[in-house]
Amino acid sequence: MAATNRKPSTTDSTTTPETETPGSDVIVVGAGPTGLLLAGDLAEAGLRVTLLERRPEALSNLTRALIVHARTLEQLDARGIADELIAGGHRLNRLRLFGDASLDPALIPSRFPFVLVTPQFEVERLLARRAREAGVTFRYDSEVLGLVQDADGVTVRVRDAQGTDQARAAYLVGTDGVRSTIRETLGLPFPGRSAVRSLVLADVRLAQEPASPFVANSTRDAFALIASFGDGWYRVIGWDRHRRAAEDAPADFNEVRECVRRAFGSDYGMHDARWVSRFHSDERQAPDYRVGRVFLAGDAAHVHSPAGGQGMNTGLQDAANLSWKLAAVLHGHAPSSLLDSYQSERHPVGKQVLRTSGAILRLGLVHTAPAFAARALVARLVNHLRPLSRRAVRGLSGIDISYPAARGAHPLAGRRAPDVRLADGSRLYELLRRGTFVLITPADETGTVRPDADRVAEASWASDRRTALLVRPDGYVAWATDATAPAERAAALRSALLQWTGGAIAPAETGQAGPADHVAVTS
């Protein structure tokens, strides 16, 4: 989908003197998980990145996300931080969704066949460290007042403790959450509805352990979820059908305990809450993820119910999709039209997550006898029909996400690339840590076409597989061929490298004398 022509709004001018911060390649607004991953990727690609955050600099435990799914762990593995995150979290080998329905993560074809329970602030801590090491410029206590864009870039007005100034970059990405200032400044609607109101949540200790590290249950009057962080603390989420307090009404520990007691028949000796909060959950999605040189990602673009734990995961995968495309365009390796594929690839994913999380939520909150009977039937089908169970757990984990491919493309094009072993003993996702494309060929074809090593890493299959595969920096297949004729395979590969990497082929092999910016890059 092409960028819209919607004109971004600007703020009124003031008489306050303003300075202009030296230009960046990209400004990211919002230092949550999505913004941190995006900023770190761009900085590691050698770009100048400024990260603006309205909050003061501090890691907070007042975060709602606690689930990291397999596909997100693969993306974090491609950045070298998955194993450290897993070491501090709690693995779930069964995932209960509603009633007696449960999913088996062992059915996920991944290096991470489990669901990781870990607080969002741990994800943020690792991503923030990576971003700092890569050279991202952090500006906390910095509120965006408005923006204006032109043919060459975006200028934002920013207020911080020193006053008001301007910052400019070639592109800007709003990752500033459900109440996104960037989305509102662009004039984008955020259509949808409230999914559930007056949820209460807390981190607590329990005198008695539940039957499983992750349990959820509902009755006609209440719903509750308990998840173990693995260190003696538990995240509890509760909802009382008959209590509809305003979002800003103070949350009470006794209210949380009563929700759990109604849902499970016991409060498990809940005590020592380190924090208690209240929120309501919406289901909304912006129609456009791109307006000119400005993009939306994460909760600024889409917000889902907490059912299934997909919100943070979807935002992190937005960032992984967009970062390499911005880097390719800013380095002159691809035309700006590549950026249109962010909308065509990620908007349908956001819509599907809305459907999935909404369906899980509604099954969890049923309260009539016929609805309970229908839910029990669905649970039996999920538990006993292996193909259905496999499809459900792969869909929830993000493993089955794929992107549109051109007509006539190889069946693997657009699909997730599994973390295959390579001939030198390494793994594909270890090689993706370079932030480049990866070309995988049979060992006897290495060197047939010599790509630019700064843009394409070469590897060989550890097996006798004959497929040639070009993997995008975000771990999805850009191109593949099963052609057997050597000349045909080499020609197809040269064409793919020209299309996807802007001519990243050594001149001695192809006669090309530099980036082929005229070649259309599609996805």
Image (cartoon, rainbow, N blue to C red):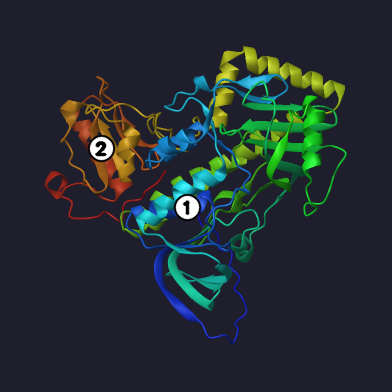
Q: Is residue 15 visible?
A: yes
Residue 493's disc number: 2
Depth check, mark 2 against mark 1: the one in front is: 1
Q: Is residue 40 left or right of residue 291?
A: left
Residue 440 at what x, y percent from top left?
A: 27, 32
Query: Is 171 left, or right, of 157 in this rendering?
Result: left
Residue 393 in the image: state x and y as whole percent.
Answer: 56, 25
Q: Is residue 404 above or below residue 421?
A: below
Name the residue nearer the viewer: 482 or 276.
Answer: 276
Hey, which residue is sitting farthest top in the picture?
384
Q: Is residue 366 visible?
A: no
* Place of residue 101 in the rendered image (x, y in percent of width and height, measured from the top left): 67, 20
Q: Are marks 2 and 1 in contact (CB under 8 Å)?
A: no
| Cα–Cα span, label 2 and label 1 | 34 Å
Residue pictured at 17% horizontal, 55% vertical? 513
Q: Residues within 10 Å of mark 2 (few under 14, many from 20)?
A: many
Q: Amino acid at mark 2?
A: Leu
**Callout 1, which amino acid?**
Leu
Q: Residue 36 has which mark?
A: 1
Q: Earlier in the sequence, mark 2 or mark 1?
A: 1
In the figure, 390 relative to 331: above or below?
Answer: above
Q: Residue 68 bears which disc, if any?
A: none
**262 and 242: which one is in front?**
262
- Residue 20, percent from left and from top: 45, 78
> Residue 248 occupies which quadrant of the picture?
bottom right
User: Does 39 appear above or below 105?
Assistant: below
SS at badge 1: helix
| Label 1: few (<14), some (14–19) or many (≥20) C-alpha neighbours in 10 Å | many
